[in-house]
Amino acid sequence: MYGAGAEYALHSLLILATQPAPASISDLASYQQIPERFLAKIFTRLKKAKLVKATEGISGGFILAKPAAKIHVMDVLSAVDPGRVLFACAEIRRNCALFGATPPGWAVSGPCRIHAFMEEAEQNLQRFLASKTLADLVCEYSCKAPKAFAKETESWFQVRKKGRGAHRKESGPSGS
């Protein structure tokens, strides 16, 4: 099962895909009320995977590194939770109380059928996630959220960005 990191990454990328300007980690975390430190670690992985890039300066932050239609959901999940599997077989088929110390050959020969079944399910899930893009999520989001909400979101990020600029001017160039 994918963890909170996958959810935070997808929600944050959805925001970046729907905003006209870069967004800072701090603003993304505040907007979603999620832990900033954890989100920063996630963005380090997203940047390493070349899914986002940082922009410098007072208006800086993160933007998508490529169009939303070129960012596959599976790419995001692989960047955030590399090597994640839905099922890990522990070979408990060997532990039946009726077998004693040595399980019979028929019980342990070949791959575990449950493991094979779950592996097939995971491959199907990965194919599905690889076929979906961030643009697909944007489309789903746009169909659900009222247009006014999108404008309010954009305004919220603009106010935050202006606040950062005003704070810099007040404190002077040395930040004192």
Image: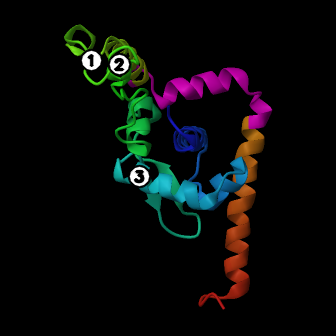
Residue displayed at 58% across by 64% down: 59
Residue displayed at 29% across by 25% down: 101
Residue displayed at 43% across by 27% down: 86
State yes or no: discs 1 and 2 in contact (Cβ < 8 Å).
yes
Q: Which residue is mark 1?
A: 103
Q: Which residues are magenta?
A: 130-149
Q: Nearer the viewer, mark 3 or mark 2?
A: 2
Q: CA distance from mark 3 to mark 2?
A: 37 Å
Circle 3: is it few (<14), some (14-19), or many (20+) Cα within 10 Å?
A: many
Q: Which mark is residue 126?
A: none
Looking at the rendered structure, the secondary structure element under dot 2 is helix
Circle 1: is it few (<14), some (14-19), or many (20+) Cα within 10 Å?
A: some
Depth check: 115 or 36 in front? 115
User: Residue 169 location in percent, x, y?
Assistant: 69, 81
Q: From what the image shows, is residue 91 above or below residue 111?
A: below
Q: Which mark is residue 45?
A: 3
User: Residue 102 location in percent, x, y?
Assistant: 25, 21
Question: Which of disc 2 and disc 3 is earlier in sequence?
Answer: 3
Q: Which residue is mark 2?
A: 93
Answer yes or no: is residue 24 visible.
no
Looking at the rendered structure, the secondary structure element under dot 3 is helix
User: Residue 14 location in percent, x, y?
Assistant: 57, 37
Q: Is residue 131 magenta?
A: yes
* Amino acid type at image mark 3: Arg
What residue occupies the far top of the structure in this picture?
A: 106
Looking at the rendered structure, the secondary structure element under dot 1 is loop
